[in-house]
Amino acid sequence: MPTRASKRPRDINQLAKMIVDISTGDLQEEVKPEREKNPAAVALGKLGAAKGGLARAAKLSPKKRKEIAKKAAKMRWAKPKG
């Protein structure tokens, strides 16, 4: 399970005090530096993703692609706004 950079208090009053302390500069919020990604792994992942979509599109018939596109559009428009 992932760990958080800083543990925030559950009590609403303690949380409010912590937020005020951070905003006034009395308390420094800990920020974890982001992990560096391996450039070779990133390139390999992008390569596979680019090939996968094209290969799937090539295997589908035009009729099936049209059905998938209609279903996707229907789902996008069905989402509640806000």
Image (cartoon, rainbow, N blue to C red):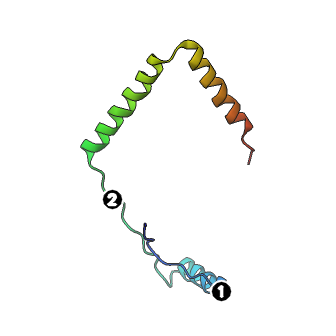
Residue underneath mark 2: 35
Q: CA distance from mark 1 to mark 2?
A: 33 Å
The kind of residue tagged 2 is: Arg
Going from N to C along the chain, the mark reached first, 1 or 2, is 1
What percent of the width, then of the height, locates residue 1?
43, 67
Label 2: few (<14), some or many (≥20) within 10 Å?
few
Name the outermost residue toward the top.
Answer: 62
Q: Nearer the viewer, residue 66 or 8?
A: 66
Kind of residue indicated by mark 1: Asn
Residue 10: x percent and y percent? 60, 81
**68 shown above or below 5:** above
Task: Choose top left, top right, bottom left or bottom right for residue 48.
Answer: top left
Q: Secondary structure at mark 1?
A: helix
**Residue with the mark numbered 1:** 13
Q: Is residue 21 left or right of residue 80?
A: left
Q: Marks 1 and 2: CB-CB under 8 Å? A: no
In the image, what residue occupies the spot 40% across and 28% down?
Answer: 52
Q: Residue at x 49, y 78 (%)?
A: 7
Q: Residue at x 55, y 83 (%)?
A: 21
Determine whether, in the image, residue 28 is placed left or right of residue 20: left
